[in-house]
Amino acid sequence: MSQLTREIREAARKLLRAGQVQVVIGFERGSLPMRSRPCFVRCEEDVDRLVWDGFCETDVARYLPKRKEKAAIVAKGCDSRALVELIKENQVVRDQVVIIGVACKGMIDGSRIEAKMGRGSIVEDDETGEKLILKGADSEEVLDRREFLHVRCKACTHPVPALYDLLVGQPGAEAPKDGFSDVEEFGALDQEARWVYLRDEMSKCIRCYACRNACPLCYCPECFVDGSQPQWVGKSTNLADTMVFHLIRAFHLAGRCVGCGACEHACPVGVDIRKLNRKLQKDMKDLFSHEAGLSLEEVCPLATFRADDPGPPMVDP
Amino acid sequence: MESDTWEPKIVAFLCNWCSYAGADLAGTSRIQYPSNMRVVRVPCSGRIDPLFILASLQKGADGVLVSGCHPGECHYLTGNYSARRKFAVLKSLLEYTGLEEGRVQFSWVSASEGARFAKVVEQVTARIKALGPSKKLVKETPGGSIHVAAHPRD
């Protein structure tokens, strides 16, 4: 059992015992190796279900809006940023939530391990420090977890929660500075190449809305794609409709997306959803010096303005 | 479509207080400008949802022009300031996805600028003509693409 797991359990036990919260939202081992799943702990006996490892990928901030009882939440850097946005947008009451912040070391991309080791070959996984121990039916392999981090985690600039009531784990070395090199690289491609790439990505989409449902910041009671009077966007997998869905969803998240990757993680067909979100994150930073989820005071750039804002290039005869 | 006689269809979202009045002035002043524009009058440029723009392209518009009051002159004081931020982000996003630069254009035209409105339309039309018919984002349906109602002269 890792030190982090021990600390999280201890904190959860204390909070439940003192009656400070009615539920602790964290992670437990999934039924398959390399899958940890969100769990809701309501009594002290269940506290030992809680774990922390490199597979606690889901953004659990998703479970807080509309919650009636007082809750504690085990939050990574990205979860806490989503929480900051939710608090700002009056979806979560700050006093109703105790944030157990975890200094995150990045989550591991199980699909890359499976690609290396073979799908279904791993029956058990364990982590100590930077070592990831993978047990097969009759083999054991030790990998360096840092080599198998999610791309988004490798580039994560704020692994330590932006907002927390208590912090577990040691903040590591300084996080990398986000240079948005991925956005620049893609932007440098030929216009047609960019279109072809996105077209091919979006043609995979089956319009299941898992991305939207997993996103902590997609909480609208009625999404623009669900409306039928008038129906703005068709509901089929027609490419134009799918494109519009993804473009507008990304736009609705402009200045709010915290880059947790919940959408990508939830997508059953592996659409590169974050391609659009990343671009908007960069634009928000470049145009309005805004990074989502870092402060409770800063207003979303698209909800405010300045008289001297940069505008789009205008037709100006 | 791509013959010499092809004329683009351009959807223009004009704010009621400035650009629409500007277009009106161009008309009452008998200023000639290309007839490719189909005007949709909106209360304010701040009213324009990016979805309107994408829906126009989806339904076969070859270009979209959005025009409102000059910054600082909004009838509702700040509508066009919010719009300006929105459009800056939207334009950048659309071009990032590989949509041709110039399919979606923006301008400020006041109620007294009839001549300027005509020039804006000329420029926008010329730009979109040069780009050719819009293909990306057009919704292809089994019976062919859906097009906006044809202009009587088409």
Image (tube, grey):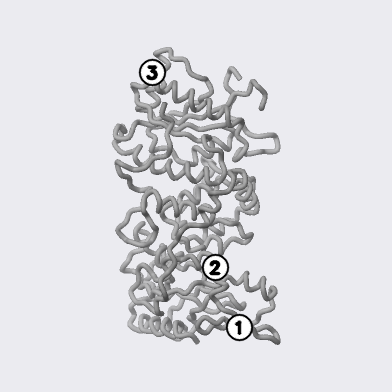
Q: Which residue carries the number 3 mark? A: B25
Labels 1 and 2: the sequence-earlier one? 1
Crowd rating for badge 1 (residues with CA inside 10 Å; few <14, some 14–19, many 20+): some
Callout 1 amino acid: Val
Q: Quadrant of residue B48?
A: top left
Q: Which residue carries the number 1 mark? A: A142
Residue A286 location, x and y as percent? 40, 51
Give the residue at x 29% y 41%. Answer: A307
The answer to whether marks 3 and 1 sit on the same chain is no
Left or right of residue B20: residue A298: left
Q: Tag 1, which secondary structure? A: strand
Left or right of residue A38: residue B147: right
Callout 2 amino acid: His
The chain that hosts pointer 2 is: A
Q: Are marks 1 and 2 in contact (CB under 8 Å)?
A: no
Q: Tag 2, which secondary structure? A: loop
Residue B153 location, x and y as percent? 59, 17
Q: Which residue carries the number 2 mark? A: A150
Callout 3 amino acid: Leu
- Label 1 and label 2: CA atoms lie apart by 18 Å
- Label 3 and label 1: CA atoms lie apart by 76 Å
